[in-house]
Image: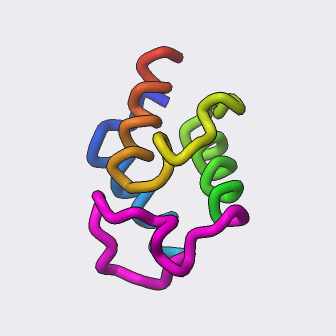
Amino acid sequence: MSDFNQESIRAKVRKFIQKYSKKDDIEDSQNLFEMSFANSLFAMQLILFIENEFELAVASEDIGMDNFDTVDKICSFIQSKMQVA
């Protein structure tokens, strides 16, 4: 887990999102749920990705737009969880 830095976290998150969006031009501050590809299924896949890729537990109280609606917020969430772990 300690092998991840800010740039590698962002790269992995962007790659995951691009896989589902089929877009290469998503900005890190762009709201993913206001775009046509993000829905509840995507949200669950994103949470599973975070748990598996970064070996983190996402608690039910963590699930919400405040943590997952932009690339920036997803990366901040992952980094904050890694600091606690």
Residue 39 on image: x %, y %: 64, 68
Magenta region, residue range: 20-41
Residue 79 lies in quadrant = top left
Residue drawn 51% across and 65% down?
A: 33
Looking at this view, is 25 or 37 the one in front? Answer: 37
Residue 29 vertical position relative to residue 50 in the rendered view, above or below = below
Residue 43 on image: x %, y %: 64, 57
Applied colour scheme: rainbow
Q: How many marks?
A: 0
47 part of magenta stretch: no
Residue 61 lies in quadrant = top right
36 part of magenta stretch: yes
Residue 14 lies in quadrant = bottom left
Q: Outermost residue, bottom direction?
A: 22
Residue 83 on image: x %, y %: 42, 19
Residue drawn 48% across and 41% down?
A: 67
Q: Main secondary structure of the magenta part?
A: loop
Residue drawn 33% across and 64% down?
A: 30
Residue 37 vertical position relative to residue 80 in the rendered view, above or below = below
Residue 20 on image: x %, y %: 56, 75
Residue 57 vertical position relative to residue 65 in the rendered view, above or below = above
